Amino acid sequence: SLRDGWGRAPSSPLPSMWALALQKEHWGSRVALLNVEDLAFWALPGAGAAPDFSVAEWTGAVAAVSDRTRGVGKDRMLHWEIAVLDPQCDDMLAELEAHEPSTQQRSLAQELSARLARRQAD
């Protein structure tokens, strides 16, 4: 609520490095790192459950985005949960994939991508 400090700066700032889940069939990787200060992006290599975070040469905390967005069309509501984790100690992949998109959301995203690709080709 506004009385409880809505809009105040957080007690600890979010890290500059953000981790995002990717669709492996499109990116060849399951996890990406984005440095929000210099806009550098790395699709992390790594098989199985261990993406290689050393590619980005980052040793600090990482903001992991867990997308819980639900709904379609006018009923769609953006819902991100952001956890600050240490990739040396925490299971980043488990956190990122804890709430994978539903089959309906995945097919909607694929349909939208196909239509955009066709529009660009025309």
Image (spheres, grey):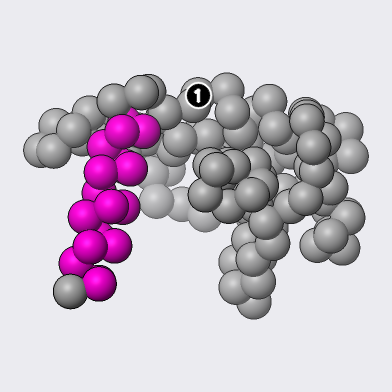
**Left or right of 3 in this view: 60:** right
- Indicate the quadrant containing the N terminus: top left, top right, bottom left or bottom right: top left
In the rendered view, would you say 121 is above or below 17? below
Q: Which residues are magenta?
A: 105-121
The amino acid marked with disc number 1 is His
User: What residue is at 50 percent from the left and 24 percent from the top?
Assistant: 99
Residue 115 position, x and y percent, is: 21, 55
Does the magenta-highlighted stretch encompass residue 118? yes
Does the magenta-highlighted stretch encompass residue 77? no
**Left or right of 97 in this view: 58:** right
Residue 90 position, x and y percent, is: 81, 31
Q: Residues within 10 Å of mark 1 (few under 14, many from 20)?
A: few
Residue 109 position, x and y percent, is: 32, 42
- Indicate the quadrant containing the C terminus: top left, top right, bottom left or bottom right: bottom left
Residue 73 position, x and y percent, is: 13, 38
Of residues 43 and 9, the one nearer the viewer is 43
Of residues 119 and 102, the one nearer the viewer is 119
Q: Which residue is mark 1?
A: 99
User: What residue is at 65 percent from the left and 71 percent from the top?
Assistant: 40
For the question of whether residue 37 can be seen, the reply is no
User: What residue is at 82 percent from the left and 50 percent from the top?
Assistant: 53
Secondary structure of the residue carrying tag 1 is: loop
**Left or right of 51 in this view: 70:** left
**Left or right of 60 in this view: 27:** left
**Residue lying farthest left?**
74
Q: Main secondary structure of the magenta part?
A: helix
